[in-house]
Image: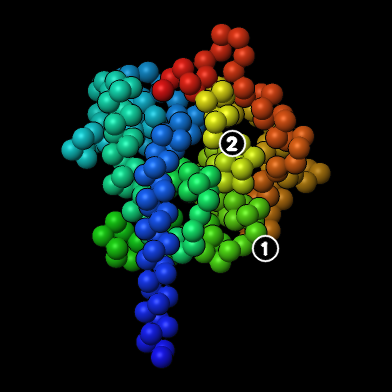
Amino acid sequence: MKRITIFMLLVVLCATSCSNQRRANHLKEDIFHCIALVEDDEGETVYNCGVRWTGPYGVTLDEKGHYFKKGDHVSKKRAKKLVYKHLQEHVYPFLKYVERDLKDREIIAVCLFIYNVGGEVFSGHSLDGSVCGHPSKFLDAINRGDKPEDIVNKMTLYRRSGKKRANGLLKRHWVVGAIYLGFIPVEDVLTFRPKQFYTTKNFGNYYVLDSHQNFKQDSQKCYFLRYDETTKKTFYRMNVAKGKQESVADII
């Protein structure tokens, strides 16, 4: 009887992971639009993001899996194909470690997180399935079925680049969390100015701060993302393209 129960559990988990991966593939256009928001196109000559030479939409690998070099040119059309290739080969496969069915907006947000930090960090597994570390607290919270607001806060544990806190990464987590929670409908992403949300210097627009303007933290050192009505309205006011300002729809 015990063996049958374990077998049925494995069947359910497999069906769930396959469902999430299938849905992700159907959502690839929406995922791409969100990537364009957080990455921009930055022109067709690769630029140094501080870690890699990077093309439009954050692509760093060519069709053969080689990193771009200084001076390389990547058209937006080519970059879009490379984004889809990367999603198919290096993002969707890690959704198999999610043990429950996700809503479409949650799948999009999880894919954005993996696109940024890598599937290995997200899952604790290499692409070949071998264990290479511990699952992220973000994944653990998803699989436990924690409150959605608590789940997105777990992303804030991943806030360092090298040995320094990466403020841009923290701002990006707010956007990904807003998509996960449904506060930013995917159709609205097309109306935003690419990467504009990084420019704010006031972290109170994204996080709960104490009286000394320091980040409030929970017992696991997670920061608290802010999604009250004032914060959400402020985000739209500061990021929706107006007049001749370039929007995500203009760069895809």
Measuring from the top left, give residue 147's x and y in whole percent.
Answer: 65, 59
Measuring from the top left, give residue 53's x and y in whole percent.
Answer: 32, 30
Q: Is residue 219 above or below residue 168?
A: below
Secondary element under disc 1, as helix, strand or loop, is: loop
Q: Earlier in the sequence, mark 2 or mark 1?
A: 2
Q: Is residue 113 left or right of residue 90?
A: right
Q: Looking at numbered disc 2 in the image, what kind of residue is underneath it?
A: Pro
Q: Is residue 153 left or right of residue 36?
A: right
Along the line of sight, which residue is nearer the eye, 245 or 100? 100
Q: Residues within 10 Å of mark 2 (few under 14, many from 20)?
A: few
Measuring from the top left, give residue 132's x and y in whole percent.
Answer: 34, 63
Q: Residue at x 57, y 24 (%)?
A: 192
Q: Which mark is residue 219?
A: 1
Q: Which mark is residue 140?
A: none
> How many numbered callouts?
2
Q: Is residue 183 above or below residue 96?
A: above
Q: Residue furthest bottom?
A: 1
Give the quarter of the image for residue 36. top left
Q: Looking at numbered disc 1 in the image, what kind of residue is underneath it?
A: Ser
Q: Looking at the figure, which quarter contains the C terminus?
A: top left
Give the quarter of the image for residue 48. top left
Q: Is residue 219 left or right of residue 168?
A: right
Q: Which mark is residue 185?
A: 2
In this view, the mark in front (2 or 1): 2
